[in-house]
Amino acid sequence: MPTRHLYLARHGAADAFGELTGVGRRQVELLGERLAGLPVGAVWHSPLSRAAASAHELSRHLPDVPVAEAAELVDHVPYVPSPAETPPSWAGFFDGYDETEAASGHRLAEALVARFAQAPEKAQPDTHEVLVTHAYQIAWLVRHALDAPPSRWLGLNSANTALTVIEYRSGLPPTVVMFNDMSHLPPDLRWTGFPGGVRP
């Protein structure tokens, strides 16, 4: 039974203008070293510059692996919860989202699932793909893999270049192999992208 292996990574740490910092480039380099031994067949990235730059840095460790943009990986809110679904800590966060914007974001999130969260056809070999994206998109794919309610993406966050792995096989539920793994990073490069008060 063929397996689709998705390696999800948030882009490296970036500045206020969305460009990788020195810390972000070092994080990506270490992630690239970790992925270099895997049979990666493709690297996909968000259209945003911090993700594109991270993907191209990764490609130095994955020679001859194609790197391409995927619009579905762009940073966006995948699901705007109803007031009853919204945790108190998120109160007010969604106040600026009208119904049109919320529906557009949800359509994009469903397109992300349709494109990447599927098992290979039975006649195909195993596939190994790296997706360089953003925290909300990783949260959405993990939520989908666990078949959790749509609002549960709110409880998930990923550090910069942390690795999440999900496997898809035909006829079986997806398997979350690991989430937010930072073992390739030294302690001083971990937990960037999280608010300072919630870092362990």
Image: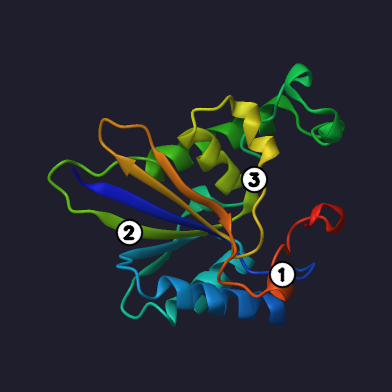
Looking at the rendered image, the quarter that the C terminus falls into is bottom right
Task: Give the image quarter of residue 38.
Answer: bottom left
Residue lying at the far top in this picture: please name it: 84
- Earlier in the chain: of badge 3 and badge 1, it is 1
Q: Nearer the viewer, mark 2 or mark 3?
A: 2
Q: Residues within 10 Å of mark 3 (few under 14, many from 20)?
A: some
Q: Is residue 158 left or right of residue 55?
A: right
- CB of mark 3 within 8 Å of CB of mark 1? no
Distance Cα–Cα, label 3 vs label 1: 17 Å
Q: Position of residue 116 (x, y in %)?
A: 39, 46
- Whether residue 2 appears in this view of the structure is yes
- Earlier in the chain: of badge 1 and badge 2, it is 1
Secondary structure at numbered mark 2? strand
Residue 110 drawn above or below residue 129: above
Q: How is the image coloured?
A: rainbow
Q: Position of residue 199 (x, y in %)?
A: 79, 57
Q: Can you identify the residue that label 1 sits on?
A: 14
| Residue 76 - label | 3
Residue sitting at 20 percent across and 42 percent down? Answer: 121
Residue sitting at 77 percent across and 71 percent down? Answer: 15
Q: Is residue 32 left or right of residue 51?
A: left
Distance Cα–Cα, label 2 vs label 3: 25 Å
Viewer-proximal residue among 99 and 9: 9
Task: Give the image quarter of residue 23.
Answer: bottom right
Secondary structure at numbered mark 3? loop
- CB of mark 2 within 8 Å of CB of mark 3? no
Q: Position of residue 179 (x, y in %)?
A: 55, 50
Q: Is residue 105 left or right of residue 68?
A: right
Give the amino acid type for the residue marked by disc 3 in the picture: His
Q: Can you identify the residue that label 2 sits on?
A: 128
- Whether residue 46 appears in this view of the structure is no
Q: Position of residue 97 (x, y in %)?
A: 76, 33
